[in-house]
Structures are given as C-alpha cells and as structure tokens.
Amino acid sequence: MKELYVGSTNDLKRRFKEHNNGEVFSTKNKKPWNLVYYEAFFSEKDARNREKKLKQHKQGLSHLKTRIQNSIKESGGFTLIELVISIFILAFAIIGVYNSFSTIVILTTGSTSRFTAVYLAQEGIEIVRNMRDSNWLNGQDWKTGFSGCESGCEADYKTGTSSGLGLIPWTSDGNYLNIKGNNFYSYDNCGGDNFCPTKFKRKITITPDPLNQNVLKVSALVIWEEKEEVPDMEVEEYLYNWY
C-alpha cells in the first residue's frame, strides 16, 4: 500500500522539492514522492483547517482518496497532497490585475509545467479584465484596445498599464514568454542576469458576442514543449459591460 502524506505550504514548488531532497524530517526516509493533488486557498486559516480535517478525520481523507484513486494508482513512489495557502495571493498583491479565486487541480508526475501554465492562463484573462476596468475608470469605451484579437494577441503583466503597451497581434508561431528576475513573465528581451527564456507561449483571443454587444468571450491558451509533446492549457471567461 502506498504512503500518503498531507501537508500545507505557501510555496508549492519549493516545498515539493524539499520533500524529495530529504529536507523534511517526516518524509525524508520515504522518497521519492509524487504530487498527485493540491488545493489552493485565499485564506491561510481555511487551508490550515482543511489540512487538519484531512489528517484527523479518516472519512474526509477516505473520500478524497476515492476521488483521486486513479492518480494515486498511476503515480510511482509515495504520494503527496499539499494544500497551497498563498502561492497565488503573492502574485495578486504585486501585479494588481487579479481577482481572488480558488481552484482545485489534479496533479500527477511531471506536472510542474502544468502548474505554471494554469497560472499563466489565468493571468492572461486577468490582464484583459484589468484593461476593461481601466477603460471604465478613464471614461473610454469598455472595448478600447481589444480590436484585432479575434485571431489572437499577446500580452504580459505590463499590458494596458501606464508603463506598458497594448495587446500585440499573435504571429504565426507566437513568442516565448521570458521570466524576469522579479519572477514576472514578460516579452522583454532576455539579457544579462535579469531575464531568462521559458518554454511557454500564451495566445489571448477576444471574440465579440454576435448577439450581445455588451459581452466579450476571452480565452487564454498556453502551450509549451514537454519532451516530444506540445501540451496546452486553456482558460475561457466571459467579460461584460456593466456600465
């Protein structure tokens, strides 16, 4: 029978690495660990309460194990469940383009890239949302800056801000996002010690609703190369003109 570990953290990538590097006393003798599941919470208290219930109440953990039984079976080594407290909250506070949200994602071996792709896809949606809100505040038409994105556009965290540019039309192959020294993803040129290229591309599509001029369909597609495959992650959302 496989060992199952439940824990909480505010940095999932770092904590997962610590477990497999033998830096956690309670798990160091049972490597390797595979992350099969995580939950994200806006509130640290909620995450701690959830962790406590899973550890103290067998029925709750048993129910969760039933839900993810295939992920547990298919993973090698020991299995790891982490409750993420604030891995998204930090980005909200710094970038200022996010709304609070909770999400549950099933993770399996090799899922670090998918975890990043979820973040980048959600960021893409929130960039467009932030542009819409800025248009309202500036007394402009709420769709200002969105034209030409029916076939796809690119944007980073500076898009639509006073220091950033507008949405950039998607080229045939798209451009790779670069990660800056402050851990922000952008299209700034790589160079020196402040930037490094990633394997991720992000295509944002904005489509007007043909039946309602106050509705836009926004999708953010993230693609990357993983060995010989080209996986993708897509998030869709509808934005409305409330004013």
Image: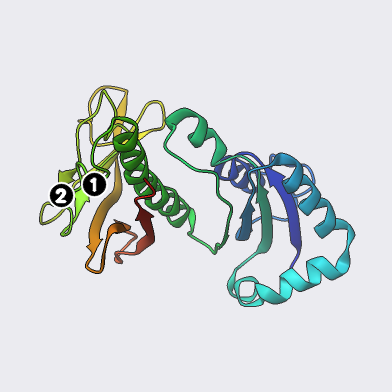
Choose top left, top right, bottom left or bottom right for residue 178. Answer: top left
Coloring applied to the structure: rainbow
- Foreground mark, 1 or 2? 1
The amino acid sitting under disc 2 is: Ser
Confirm or deny contact between disc 1 and disc 2 (CB under 8 A): yes
Task: Give the alpha-carbon distance from disc 1 to disc 2, as whole Å.
Answer: 8 Å
Left or right: where 42 falls relative to 173: right
How crowded is the residue under tag 2: few (<14 C-alpha within 10 Å), some, or many (20+)?
Answer: few
- Residue 4 horizontal/vertical position (percent): 75, 62
Q: Which residue is mark 2?
A: 147
Choose top left, top right, bottom left or bottom right for residue 207. Answer: bottom left
The amino acid sitting under disc 1 is: Lys
Position above or below: 24 against 212 = above
How crowded is the residue under tag 1: few (<14 C-alpha within 10 Å), some, or many (20+)?
Answer: some
Residue placed most toward the observer, 233 or 150: 150
Q: Which mark is residue 47?
A: none
Position above or below: 65 against 100 = below
Q: Residue at x 39, y 45 (%)?
A: 126
Q: Which residue is mark 1?
A: 143
Position above or below: 95 against 51 = above
Q: Residue at x 81, y 59 (%)?
A: 54
- Residue 51 horizontal/vertical position (percent): 78, 52
Q: Residue at x 36, y 39 (%)?
A: 133
Name the quadrant of the N terminus: bottom right
